[in-house]
Image (spheres, grey):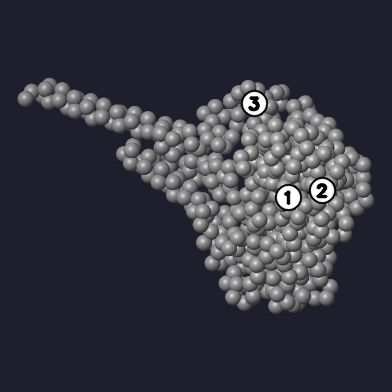
Amino acid sequence: MNGINFNHLKRRNFIKKATLSSFATLIGSEIVFGSKMFEGYQPIALQDPDPFKMFSKNKEMIVLNDKPWNIEAQAHLLDDKITPNSAMFIRNNGLIPENIDVRNWTLTIDGESVNKEKTYTLNELKSKFKEYSYQLTLECGGNGRSEFNPPAKGNQWTVGAVHCAKWTGIRLRDVLDDVGIKKDAVYIGYHSSDVHLSRDPYKEPISRGAPISKSLQEETLLAFKMNGKDIPLVHGYPLRLVAGGWPASVSGKWVNRISIRNKIHDGTKMTGTAYRIPCEPVAPGDKVKDEDMCIIESMPVKSLITFPKSGATINEGKSLNIRGHAWAGELVVSKMEYSIDFGATWNECQIELPVNRLAWQHFSTSINFPKKGYYEIWARATDSQGTAQPMILPGWNPKGYLNNACHRIAIKVK
Amino acid sequence: MSQEEDFRKGIKEIYHKLMLFFSLFIIAGAFLLLYVLNPNLNVFNAKENNYVETPVIELDEDRVENGIHVRTGLISADGLMIVVNNCTNCHSAKLVTQNRMNKERWNATIRWMQETQNLWDLGKNQEIIVDYLVANYPVEVVGRRANLTDIDWYELKD
């Protein structure tokens, strides 16, 4: 079972009840209307205000939003090759589902383009299909939004809405093979058990998806495990669609239904301006009509210096070891460079091949500084098609997606 | 024993029982208060859990400190309570305070929330809300790439 998080929620209830009865003992009688008093009302003293404990996150994670929960990492927290839960960003569009009943959890495959609707229990999925594990890079489409000018609305992510964990599960394509999909299938759309912010049961907080071609890739999983353990509740327990290299919103959490569509899926956050950029480039601040916005697919090339943490002071004459990760959506990073003179000169550094397709790649190097002073180390990755990260912000877009400008850290040599 | 004495004794007994009851009541009250102020009941490390900005207790729900409405983190200015009452029911005030938009875009955002997120008609309050937002959370022009700021300098050991 999903230990920490679940227990935590349950424990709250226990404390609530225990508190109530201990009050009663103290006062020597039952609290009249006691049960009424607590119904649907979390007394302020009993609220759990600590998201770091609740989600098992590093205390240096940044809380952008607490309703819904949105939390990001800082670059130096992402130093591990495989991101641990403690440093994984949290992005929610709605409220985290409560009271998940794993024993009765099912996944239904339906839609215009299935031969016949079919429902599986979790156990059926686990026993019927072969299991695979991949390290998959998931980056929020809005990672880096905070830098856009004019500013874009939404959570103001800086650099930390990306992670690469190891996901274990079954291939979506094996399930779709078993169900049988029609030739006219175009897109898949997921449906989940999270709750709309307005608590309107007829509204879905998010229901996105991917074209059939992406859905049939070997690495597109229906995952049960993350880093070898049950997926933490906030990251999609008990079943998550994981589609590496694409905006992380494609990787639906708490999935209980997947619709095979004969057209582009039109669920919440698929239409309008959500997770879309102008089909043709626009000037900063331009108005763009909905019909001129195109869905984001593969994420662009990007990199992050994860060591040292920005702000390091070193002595003159010392060399500095740096390291980090680079990724390129569906592509591979073929070149990694750094600059200590604001891009006037670039030096190439070692970059490892990805452990599997769609996993981020690790770079490291040692840097010598010519004299004392203030420096910035800028990192620049180039993908296998020759496209590099820009030093300044890439094309402005109304919702502030896809900022893959070079990451930089500040260093002082004294 | 005379009847009067009996009666007096009875009164005394009731008096003592009442006193006992009230003392217990006060003690229970004190515990309750302690529990409310320090829910973990760990008197010695009370400071330990203070790493979240969200206030655990708000005795005065709408307390303002240093110009900030403590419960929501919103700037205290004209229109504050109308913003609190209309804009923090469904989502956190953090979604408001981290954004910078002009009048037109705030209005468009409100329209979007009404069309898709079940936001109610704000009536005359809409103007008050939007005025509050553009006055207190104005758009800052940062150009195509800003300087690194808030650098936390430290000595890097080998």
Q: CA distance from mark 2 to mark 3?
A: 47 Å
Q: Is residue A28 left or right of residue B145?
A: left
Q: Calculate the distance from the C-alpha at mark 1 to the C-alpha at mark 3.
A: 46 Å
**Residue at figure coordinates x 81%, y 65% from the top left:** A211
Indicate the amino acid at tag 1.
Thr
* Marking on residue A376: none
What x and y, as percent, mark residue A360?
Answer: 72, 57
Of badges 2 and 3, nearer the viewer stands 2
Considering only order in the chain, which callout, 1 or 2, is on the residue closer to the N terminus? 2
Check disc 1: other Cα within 10 Å, few if <14, some if 14-19, many if 20+. Answer: some
Q: Regarding mark 3 in the picture, which secondary structure is present there?
A: strand
- State the image coordinates of residue A219 (x, y, percent, origin top left): 72, 67
Query: Which mark is drawn over residue A347?
Result: 2
* Circle 2 SS class: strand
On screen, residue A183 versus residue A316, left or right, reads: right
Q: Position of residue B107 (x, y in %)?
A: 81, 36
Q: Nearer the viewer, residue B158 or A195?
A: B158
Q: Which of the 4 image quadrants contains residue A237?
A: bottom right
- Type of amino acid at the residue the image marks with label 2: Asn
Q: Which residue is mark 1?
A: A365
Q: Are marks 2 and 1 on the same chain?
A: yes
- The residue wearing badge 3 is B68
**How far from the left and from the top, in percent, is residue A293?**
88, 52
Labels 2 and 3 within one chain: no
Label 2 – label 1 distance at C-alpha: 10 Å
Pointer 2 local density, CA inside 10 Å: few below 14, some 14–19, many at least 20: some
